[in-house]
Image (tube, helix red, strand yellow):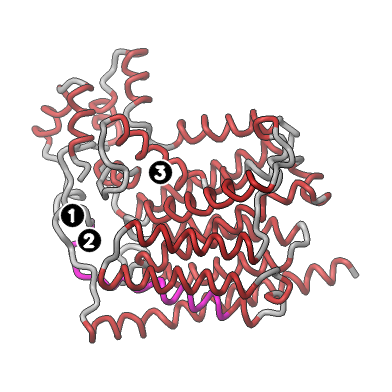
Amino acid sequence: MEQLLLLNEGLAMGVAFLFACMVSYLSIPVIISAAEKKHLFDHPDNDRKLHSEAIPTLGGIAIFFAFLLTFALSPWAAGLEGFSYLVAALLILFFVGLKDDLVIISAKKKLVAQLVAAGLVVFGSDILISNFHGVFGLAEIPYWFAVPITFFTIIVVINAVNLIDGIDGLAGGIGAIASLLFGITFWYTGHLPMAVFSFCLTGALAGFLYHNFSPASIFMGDTGSMLLGFLLGIQAIEFIGLSGEPAFVSIFGNASPILPVAILGFPLYDTLRVVLRRVRRKKSIFEPGQDHVHHELLRMGFSHKNASLLLYGKSLILAVAISVLAMFSINVNILLGAVIVGSLLIFPTNGMKRKILTSLFGVDWLAFRSQRWGIEFDNEKSSSQDINQPVPEKEFEVLAERSSDEKEEEIDSIAV
Protein backbone atom coordinates (compact mmCIF):
# COMPACT_ATOMS: atom_id res chain seq x y z
CA MET A 1 0.00 0.00 0.00
CA GLU A 2 2.82 2.37 0.89
CA GLN A 3 4.60 1.62 -2.41
CA LEU A 4 1.36 2.31 -4.32
CA LEU A 5 0.98 5.62 -2.51
CA LEU A 6 4.56 6.61 -3.38
CA LEU A 7 3.91 5.65 -7.01
CA ASN A 8 0.79 7.79 -7.14
CA GLU A 9 2.63 10.71 -5.55
CA GLY A 10 5.47 10.26 -8.01
CA LEU A 11 3.06 10.35 -10.93
CA ALA A 12 1.53 13.54 -9.53
CA MET A 13 4.96 15.16 -9.29
CA GLY A 14 5.71 14.09 -12.86
CA VAL A 15 2.43 15.51 -14.13
CA ALA A 16 3.08 18.81 -12.35
CA PHE A 17 6.56 19.00 -13.85
CA LEU A 18 5.41 18.19 -17.38
CA PHE A 19 2.42 20.53 -17.30
CA ALA A 20 4.52 23.47 -16.07
CA CYS A 21 7.18 22.65 -18.66
CA MET A 22 4.61 22.54 -21.47
CA VAL A 23 2.98 25.83 -20.42
CA SER A 24 6.35 27.59 -20.24
CA TYR A 25 7.61 26.08 -23.50
CA LEU A 26 4.48 27.06 -25.44
CA SER A 27 4.28 30.55 -23.92
CA ILE A 28 7.73 31.67 -25.03
CA PRO A 29 7.04 31.86 -28.81
CA VAL A 30 3.93 33.98 -28.09
CA ILE A 31 5.98 36.32 -25.88
CA ILE A 32 8.76 36.58 -28.47
CA SER A 33 6.22 37.40 -31.19
CA ALA A 34 4.62 40.12 -29.05
CA ALA A 35 8.05 41.54 -28.20
CA GLU A 36 8.98 41.72 -31.87
CA LYS A 37 5.76 43.55 -32.75
CA LYS A 38 6.22 46.07 -29.95
CA HIS A 39 10.03 46.25 -30.28
CA LEU A 40 10.59 45.18 -26.67
CA PHE A 41 14.22 44.10 -26.80
CA ASP A 42 17.36 44.21 -24.70
CA HIS A 43 19.91 45.88 -26.96
CA PRO A 44 23.67 45.25 -26.73
CA ASP A 45 25.60 48.19 -25.30
CA ASN A 46 29.22 47.25 -26.14
CA ASP A 47 29.95 47.49 -22.44
CA ARG A 48 28.40 45.23 -19.80
CA LYS A 49 26.02 43.10 -21.87
CA LEU A 50 27.43 40.00 -23.51
CA HIS A 51 24.96 39.45 -26.36
CA SER A 52 25.52 40.95 -29.80
CA GLU A 53 21.89 40.99 -31.01
CA ALA A 54 18.67 42.55 -29.70
CA ILE A 55 16.87 39.88 -27.65
CA PRO A 56 13.55 40.01 -25.73
CA THR A 57 13.88 40.03 -21.93
CA LEU A 58 10.34 38.97 -21.04
CA GLY A 59 10.95 35.27 -20.40
CA GLY A 60 10.06 35.80 -16.74
CA ILE A 61 6.43 36.13 -17.81
CA ALA A 62 6.42 32.51 -18.97
CA ILE A 63 8.13 31.28 -15.78
CA PHE A 64 5.64 33.17 -13.62
CA PHE A 65 2.59 32.02 -15.55
CA ALA A 66 3.69 28.38 -15.83
CA PHE A 67 4.62 28.04 -12.15
CA LEU A 68 1.61 29.83 -10.68
CA LEU A 69 -0.96 28.22 -12.99
CA THR A 70 0.35 24.70 -12.41
CA PHE A 71 0.73 25.01 -8.65
CA ALA A 72 -2.63 26.77 -8.18
CA LEU A 73 -4.40 24.02 -10.12
CA SER A 74 -2.80 21.26 -8.06
CA PRO A 75 -4.72 19.93 -5.03
CA TRP A 76 -1.65 20.62 -2.85
CA ALA A 77 -1.84 24.41 -3.19
CA ALA A 78 -4.50 24.50 -0.46
CA GLY A 79 -2.10 22.62 1.83
CA LEU A 80 0.46 25.42 1.67
CA GLU A 81 -0.15 27.78 4.56
CA GLY A 82 -0.91 31.33 3.50
CA PHE A 83 -1.03 30.55 -0.21
CA SER A 84 -2.87 33.81 -0.93
CA TYR A 85 -0.01 35.79 0.63
CA LEU A 86 2.45 33.92 -1.59
CA VAL A 87 0.42 34.86 -4.66
CA ALA A 88 0.34 38.50 -3.57
CA ALA A 89 4.12 38.49 -3.08
CA LEU A 90 4.68 36.95 -6.51
CA LEU A 91 2.41 39.52 -8.15
CA ILE A 92 4.37 42.38 -6.57
CA LEU A 93 7.70 41.01 -7.77
CA PHE A 94 6.23 40.21 -11.18
CA PHE A 95 4.98 43.73 -11.89
CA VAL A 96 8.04 45.46 -10.44
CA GLY A 97 10.35 43.18 -12.43
CA LEU A 98 8.29 43.67 -15.59
CA LYS A 99 8.45 47.44 -15.23
CA ASP A 100 12.22 47.23 -14.76
CA ASP A 101 12.55 45.10 -17.91
CA LEU A 102 10.53 47.63 -19.90
CA VAL A 103 11.58 51.06 -18.59
CA ILE A 104 14.21 50.39 -15.86
CA ILE A 105 13.62 51.38 -12.22
CA SER A 106 16.09 52.12 -9.44
CA ALA A 107 17.68 49.43 -7.28
CA LYS A 108 16.16 51.09 -4.21
CA LYS A 109 12.61 50.63 -5.53
CA LYS A 110 13.32 46.99 -6.37
CA LEU A 111 14.68 46.43 -2.86
CA VAL A 112 11.49 47.90 -1.35
CA ALA A 113 9.41 45.51 -3.47
CA GLN A 114 11.56 42.58 -2.34
CA LEU A 115 11.14 43.55 1.31
CA VAL A 116 7.37 43.83 0.93
CA ALA A 117 7.20 40.43 -0.79
CA ALA A 118 9.35 38.90 1.94
CA GLY A 119 7.13 40.45 4.60
CA LEU A 120 4.02 38.92 3.05
CA VAL A 121 5.35 35.36 3.23
CA VAL A 122 7.03 35.82 6.62
CA PHE A 123 3.99 37.25 8.38
CA GLY A 124 1.25 35.82 6.17
CA SER A 125 2.56 32.37 5.26
CA ASP A 126 4.65 31.81 8.42
CA ILE A 127 7.76 31.06 6.37
CA LEU A 128 10.40 31.56 9.03
CA ILE A 129 13.86 30.34 10.04
CA SER A 130 13.22 29.48 13.69
CA ASN A 131 16.00 26.97 14.38
CA PHE A 132 19.69 26.84 13.42
CA HIS A 133 19.97 23.14 14.36
CA GLY A 134 23.45 23.53 15.85
CA VAL A 135 25.00 25.99 13.39
CA PHE A 136 27.26 28.33 15.42
CA GLY A 137 26.05 26.46 18.49
CA LEU A 138 22.50 27.79 18.11
CA ALA A 139 19.27 25.82 18.21
CA GLU A 140 15.90 27.55 18.49
CA ILE A 141 16.13 31.30 18.07
CA PRO A 142 13.73 33.98 19.38
CA TYR A 143 11.13 35.46 17.05
CA TRP A 144 12.72 38.92 17.10
CA PHE A 145 15.91 37.37 15.70
CA ALA A 146 14.20 34.88 13.36
CA VAL A 147 12.33 37.58 11.42
CA PRO A 148 15.36 39.65 10.28
CA ILE A 149 17.35 36.48 9.54
CA THR A 150 14.53 35.25 7.29
CA PHE A 151 14.24 38.64 5.55
CA PHE A 152 18.00 38.66 5.01
CA THR A 153 17.96 35.13 3.56
CA ILE A 154 15.22 35.92 1.06
CA ILE A 155 16.81 39.19 -0.08
CA VAL A 156 20.26 37.60 -0.45
CA VAL A 157 18.98 34.69 -2.53
CA ILE A 158 16.89 36.96 -4.77
CA ASN A 159 19.87 39.16 -5.57
CA ALA A 160 22.34 36.27 -5.81
CA VAL A 161 20.23 34.69 -8.55
CA ASN A 162 19.88 38.06 -10.26
CA LEU A 163 23.66 38.49 -10.31
CA ILE A 164 24.37 35.16 -12.03
CA ASP A 165 21.85 35.90 -14.79
CA GLY A 166 24.60 37.07 -17.11
CA ILE A 167 25.03 34.40 -19.79
CA ASP A 168 22.68 32.15 -21.74
CA GLY A 169 21.03 29.45 -19.64
CA LEU A 170 23.00 30.00 -16.44
CA ALA A 171 20.45 31.30 -13.93
CA GLY A 172 17.66 29.12 -15.31
CA GLY A 173 19.80 25.98 -15.25
CA ILE A 174 21.19 26.57 -11.76
CA GLY A 175 17.68 27.34 -10.54
CA ALA A 176 16.25 24.18 -12.12
CA ILE A 177 18.95 22.00 -10.54
CA ALA A 178 18.43 23.57 -7.11
CA SER A 179 14.65 23.31 -7.29
CA LEU A 180 14.86 19.68 -8.42
CA LEU A 181 17.11 18.76 -5.49
CA PHE A 182 14.82 20.58 -3.07
CA GLY A 183 11.78 18.86 -4.57
CA ILE A 184 13.21 15.34 -4.33
CA THR A 185 14.00 15.88 -0.65
CA PHE A 186 10.59 17.39 0.14
CA TRP A 187 8.93 14.45 -1.61
CA TYR A 188 10.98 11.86 0.26
CA THR A 189 10.23 13.48 3.64
CA GLY A 190 6.49 13.68 2.93
CA HIS A 191 6.20 17.46 2.44
CA LEU A 192 4.01 17.12 -0.63
CA PRO A 193 2.87 20.76 -1.02
CA MET A 194 6.48 21.95 -1.07
CA ALA A 195 7.48 19.03 -3.31
CA VAL A 196 4.86 20.02 -5.89
CA PHE A 197 5.95 23.66 -5.45
CA SER A 198 9.52 22.65 -6.35
CA PHE A 199 8.60 20.43 -9.30
CA CYS A 200 6.31 23.12 -10.75
CA LEU A 201 9.19 25.59 -10.68
CA THR A 202 11.60 23.02 -12.15
CA GLY A 203 9.17 22.33 -15.00
CA ALA A 204 8.62 26.03 -15.69
CA LEU A 205 12.39 26.55 -15.88
CA ALA A 206 12.90 23.50 -18.09
CA GLY A 207 10.43 24.83 -20.66
CA PHE A 208 12.08 28.25 -20.53
CA LEU A 209 15.60 26.81 -20.88
CA TYR A 210 14.73 25.27 -24.24
CA HIS A 211 14.55 28.85 -25.56
CA ASN A 212 17.16 30.40 -23.25
CA PHE A 213 20.04 27.94 -23.60
CA SER A 214 22.83 29.15 -25.87
CA PRO A 215 22.16 30.64 -28.36
CA ALA A 216 19.30 32.24 -26.43
CA SER A 217 16.22 33.58 -28.19
CA ILE A 218 14.87 35.15 -24.98
CA PHE A 219 16.13 36.22 -21.53
CA MET A 220 14.30 35.89 -18.22
CA GLY A 221 14.97 39.52 -17.33
CA ASP A 222 14.55 40.95 -13.85
CA THR A 223 10.99 39.61 -13.85
CA GLY A 224 12.29 36.08 -14.01
CA SER A 225 15.41 36.44 -11.88
CA MET A 226 13.58 38.09 -8.97
CA LEU A 227 10.77 35.53 -9.04
CA LEU A 228 13.24 32.67 -9.32
CA GLY A 229 15.38 33.93 -6.44
CA PHE A 230 12.30 34.50 -4.29
CA LEU A 231 10.92 30.99 -4.91
CA LEU A 232 14.33 29.40 -4.28
CA GLY A 233 14.65 31.40 -1.07
CA ILE A 234 11.29 30.08 0.15
CA GLN A 235 12.35 26.51 -0.64
CA ALA A 236 15.65 26.99 1.20
CA ILE A 237 13.88 28.30 4.31
CA GLU A 238 11.36 25.47 4.31
CA PHE A 239 14.21 23.00 3.78
CA ILE A 240 15.94 24.22 6.95
CA GLY A 241 13.01 22.93 8.99
CA LEU A 242 13.49 19.35 7.77
CA SER A 243 15.90 18.50 10.61
CA GLY A 244 12.77 18.00 12.69
CA GLU A 245 11.56 15.24 10.35
CA PRO A 246 12.53 11.63 11.18
CA ALA A 247 12.80 10.67 7.49
CA PHE A 248 15.33 13.42 6.90
CA VAL A 249 17.26 12.94 10.15
CA SER A 250 17.66 9.22 9.46
CA ILE A 251 19.78 10.05 6.40
CA PHE A 252 21.25 13.53 6.80
CA GLY A 253 21.08 14.12 10.56
CA ASN A 254 20.63 17.80 11.43
CA ALA A 255 22.28 19.05 8.22
CA SER A 256 19.15 20.83 6.95
CA PRO A 257 20.63 24.35 7.47
CA ILE A 258 23.78 23.44 5.51
CA LEU A 259 22.45 21.56 2.48
CA PRO A 260 20.56 24.60 1.07
CA VAL A 261 23.83 26.56 1.26
CA ALA A 262 25.50 23.81 -0.76
CA ILE A 263 22.62 23.54 -3.24
CA LEU A 264 22.69 27.30 -3.80
CA GLY A 265 26.47 27.35 -3.42
CA PHE A 266 27.33 28.89 -6.77
CA PRO A 267 25.09 32.00 -6.69
CA LEU A 268 25.95 32.60 -3.02
CA TYR A 269 29.67 32.18 -3.65
CA ASP A 270 29.63 34.45 -6.70
CA THR A 271 27.79 37.17 -4.80
CA LEU A 272 30.14 37.05 -1.81
CA ARG A 273 33.17 36.99 -4.10
CA VAL A 274 32.07 40.09 -6.01
CA VAL A 275 31.13 41.99 -2.84
CA LEU A 276 34.47 41.28 -1.15
CA ARG A 277 36.38 42.12 -4.29
CA ARG A 278 34.66 45.46 -4.79
CA VAL A 279 34.89 46.43 -1.13
CA ARG A 280 38.61 45.68 -1.20
CA ARG A 281 38.99 47.90 -4.26
CA LYS A 282 36.62 50.57 -2.81
CA LYS A 283 34.11 50.19 -5.63
CA SER A 284 30.32 50.18 -5.43
CA ILE A 285 28.78 46.75 -4.93
CA PHE A 286 25.56 47.92 -6.60
CA GLU A 287 26.97 48.88 -9.97
CA PRO A 288 27.00 46.26 -12.75
CA GLY A 289 30.34 44.89 -13.88
CA GLN A 290 32.16 42.03 -15.55
CA ASP A 291 33.81 40.58 -12.47
CA HIS A 292 31.54 37.58 -11.94
CA VAL A 293 32.57 33.94 -12.23
CA HIS A 294 30.90 33.50 -15.61
CA HIS A 295 32.84 36.48 -16.97
CA GLU A 296 36.08 34.85 -15.81
CA LEU A 297 35.16 31.69 -17.72
CA LEU A 298 34.36 33.63 -20.88
CA ARG A 299 37.72 35.36 -20.70
CA MET A 300 39.33 31.94 -20.39
CA GLY A 301 37.85 31.06 -23.77
CA PHE A 302 34.70 29.16 -22.77
CA SER A 303 31.56 29.71 -24.81
CA HIS A 304 28.27 30.63 -23.12
CA LYS A 305 27.12 27.03 -23.53
CA ASN A 306 30.27 25.44 -22.10
CA ALA A 307 30.53 27.95 -19.25
CA SER A 308 26.94 27.22 -18.21
CA LEU A 309 27.42 23.45 -18.46
CA LEU A 310 30.63 23.65 -16.43
CA LEU A 311 28.92 25.62 -13.67
CA TYR A 312 25.96 23.21 -13.69
CA GLY A 313 28.39 20.36 -13.13
CA LYS A 314 30.35 22.13 -10.41
CA SER A 315 27.15 23.07 -8.58
CA LEU A 316 25.97 19.46 -8.67
CA ILE A 317 29.33 18.18 -7.46
CA LEU A 318 29.28 20.57 -4.50
CA ALA A 319 25.70 19.67 -3.53
CA VAL A 320 26.23 15.91 -3.88
CA ALA A 321 29.58 15.95 -2.05
CA ILE A 322 28.15 17.83 0.94
CA SER A 323 25.08 15.56 0.97
CA VAL A 324 27.33 12.48 1.12
CA LEU A 325 29.36 13.99 3.96
CA ALA A 326 26.14 14.75 5.84
CA MET A 327 25.25 11.05 5.78
CA PHE A 328 28.19 10.40 8.13
CA SER A 329 26.66 12.57 10.87
CA ILE A 330 29.43 15.17 10.64
CA ASN A 331 29.04 18.22 12.87
CA VAL A 332 27.09 20.93 11.05
CA ASN A 333 29.79 23.56 11.61
CA ILE A 334 32.42 21.28 10.08
CA LEU A 335 29.98 20.66 7.25
CA LEU A 336 29.62 24.41 6.73
CA GLY A 337 33.41 24.66 6.58
CA ALA A 338 33.39 21.91 3.95
CA VAL A 339 30.97 23.97 1.83
CA ILE A 340 33.28 26.99 2.03
CA VAL A 341 36.43 24.98 1.26
CA GLY A 342 34.67 23.11 -1.54
CA SER A 343 33.50 26.37 -3.12
CA LEU A 344 37.00 27.81 -2.98
CA LEU A 345 38.39 24.69 -4.63
CA ILE A 346 35.97 24.36 -7.53
CA PHE A 347 35.09 27.98 -8.33
CA PRO A 348 37.46 30.80 -9.42
CA THR A 349 39.12 32.59 -6.47
CA ASN A 350 40.52 35.89 -7.83
CA GLY A 351 43.83 34.21 -8.68
CA MET A 352 44.41 32.79 -5.17
CA LYS A 353 44.88 29.17 -6.31
CA ARG A 354 47.06 30.33 -9.21
CA LYS A 355 49.31 32.26 -6.85
CA ILE A 356 49.61 29.29 -4.49
CA LEU A 357 50.57 26.97 -7.35
CA THR A 358 53.07 29.49 -8.65
CA SER A 359 54.68 29.95 -5.23
CA LEU A 360 54.82 26.19 -4.59
CA PHE A 361 56.08 25.04 -7.98
CA GLY A 362 57.54 28.18 -9.53
CA VAL A 363 55.37 27.76 -12.63
CA ASP A 364 53.37 30.53 -14.30
CA TRP A 365 49.97 28.86 -14.25
CA LEU A 366 48.58 31.05 -17.03
CA ALA A 367 51.35 30.07 -19.44
CA PHE A 368 51.26 26.40 -18.38
CA ARG A 369 47.50 26.20 -18.85
CA SER A 370 47.76 27.73 -22.30
CA GLN A 371 50.49 25.31 -23.39
CA ARG A 372 48.90 22.22 -21.81
CA TRP A 373 45.20 22.65 -22.65
CA GLY A 374 45.03 25.67 -24.93
CA ILE A 375 42.99 27.63 -22.36
CA GLU A 376 43.81 31.30 -22.48
CA PHE A 377 42.82 34.12 -20.13
CA ASP A 378 42.70 37.66 -21.46
CA ASN A 379 42.09 40.29 -18.78
CA GLU A 380 41.62 43.01 -21.39
CA LYS A 381 38.52 41.51 -22.93
CA SER A 382 35.41 43.23 -21.67
CA SER A 383 32.98 44.01 -24.47
CA SER A 384 30.28 41.80 -25.93
CA GLN A 385 32.08 41.86 -29.27
CA ASP A 386 35.50 40.62 -28.13
CA ILE A 387 34.94 38.61 -24.94
CA ASN A 388 34.61 35.36 -26.84
CA GLN A 389 37.32 36.03 -29.41
CA PRO A 390 40.57 34.02 -29.14
CA VAL A 391 43.72 35.75 -27.93
CA PRO A 392 46.49 36.05 -30.57
CA GLU A 393 49.50 33.92 -29.65
CA LYS A 394 51.95 36.84 -29.45
CA GLU A 395 49.52 38.88 -27.37
CA PHE A 396 49.12 36.03 -24.89
CA GLU A 397 52.86 35.56 -24.60
CA VAL A 398 53.17 39.20 -23.55
CA LEU A 399 50.28 38.78 -21.11
CA ALA A 400 51.85 35.69 -19.54
CA GLU A 401 55.06 37.60 -18.85
CA ARG A 402 53.36 40.27 -16.75
CA SER A 403 53.50 40.17 -12.99
CA SER A 404 50.59 38.76 -11.01
CA ASP A 405 49.93 42.18 -9.45
CA GLU A 406 49.55 43.76 -12.88
CA LYS A 407 47.16 40.98 -13.88
CA GLU A 408 45.04 41.54 -10.78
CA GLU A 409 44.85 45.27 -11.48
CA GLU A 410 43.78 44.63 -15.06
CA ILE A 411 41.06 42.19 -13.96
CA ASP A 412 39.69 44.74 -11.53
CA SER A 413 39.86 47.54 -14.09
CA ILE A 414 37.17 45.88 -16.23
CA ALA A 415 34.47 46.31 -13.59
CA VAL A 416 32.10 49.02 -14.68
Q: Disc 3 designates what residue?
A: 271
Question: Which residue is depicted at the point 73% across and 67% down?
Answer: 192
Q: Nearer the viewer, mark 2 or mark 3?
A: 3
- Viewed as shown, does residue 103 lie left or right of 145? left
- On the image, which quarter does residue 226 sit in? bottom left
In this picture, which residue range is highlighted in magenta?
Answer: 50-69
Q: Which mark is residue 384?
A: 1
Q: Position of residue 188 (x, y in %)?
A: 75, 58
Earlier-in-chain disc, 1 versus 2: 2
Contact (Cβ within 8 Å) of mark 1 with mark 2: yes
> Where does the N terminus fall, quadrant-wise?
bottom right
CA–CA distance between discs 3 and 1?
22 Å
Circle 1: element type: loop
Circle 2: element type: loop
Q: Position of residue 351 (x, y in %)?
A: 32, 28
- Viewed as shown, does residue 36 lie left or right of 319? left
Earlier-in-chain disc, 3 versus 1: 3
